[in-house]
Amino acid sequence: MTLHHFIGSNTELPIGSFARNPTYKPLSEVKLKGVSLDKHLKKNNSSNRITVYETEEDASGIDVFDLDTGYEPIRNKFTTPFVYEVQGYFQANNTLGQRKSIKTLFNYIDEHLLKEDFIEIYSCWDGHEEKEKEESKDVVINLSTFQFGKHLKLKDINHLCETFFLEDKQYVLIKK
């Protein structure tokens, strides 16, 4: 199963990929352990350039999409009119790549969040969009003060990225 993440805002947000660091190489230069590209190279022009990520951190970032019609039921978890799907590694914060995805998400939110406004995040397993959220997992994060919930005051955005991750049926309110 896939844990999906959604973001809601009172204003339209830009869609696309953010903070990924690809390189572009001819297919003939790509080396994959245990995989032979000989057939593919003969079949296609070996000078075609393909997207390559040298490290997990290079591949990490976020993608923001318009909400697919199959996920329309998720709108009832939000109070905001603009709801999007957001993809990235948000379920854990154990690796540099995971922390980069989380940091990219918060930088994206900080950049597009107006002072005194808020953005909402909700996560759930695929097919569970209509199930009730678990209010015990609700959390509020203030990006101006780095207050995480009621009891945790963080130093900065890096500390937030080392602390934060998303769970199934979790609602997060982020304000500035």
Image (cartoon, helix red, strand yellow):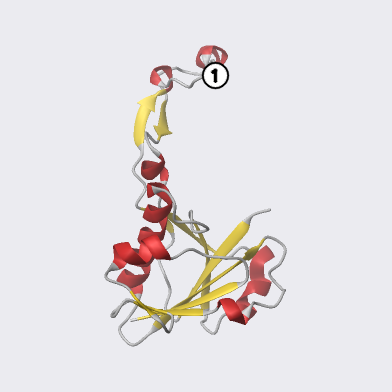
Q: Position of residue 49 (x, y in %)?
A: 40, 27
Q: Nearer the viewer, residue 146 or 31?
A: 146
Q: Position of residue 77 (x, y in %)?
A: 61, 79
Q: Is residue 43 left or right of residue 152?
A: right
Answer with the quarter of the image where residue 129 lies: bottom right
**Residue at x 61%, y 76% (from the top left corner):** 75
Q: Position of residue 40 (x, y in %)?
A: 55, 17
**Residue 59, relative to residue 66: is it above or below?**
above
Farthest front residue in view:
151
**Residue at x 37%, y 62% (from the top left corner):** 161
**Residue 81, relative to residue 14: is it above or below?**
below
Residue at the spot of label 1: 35
**Residue at x 36%, y 60% (from the top left corner):** 103
Amino acid of disc 1: Val
Farthest bottom residue in view:
116
Q: Nearer the viewer, residue 82 or 100?
A: 100
Q: Indicate the secondary structure of the residue bearing disc 1.
A: loop
Answer with the quarter of the image where residue 130 lies: bottom right
Q: Position of residue 154 (x, y in %)?
A: 32, 73
Answer with the quarter of the image where residue 147 lies: bottom left
Q: Nearer the viewer, residue 28 or 134?
A: 134
Q: Nearer the viewer, residue 116 or 81?
A: 116
The C terminus lies in quadrant: bottom left
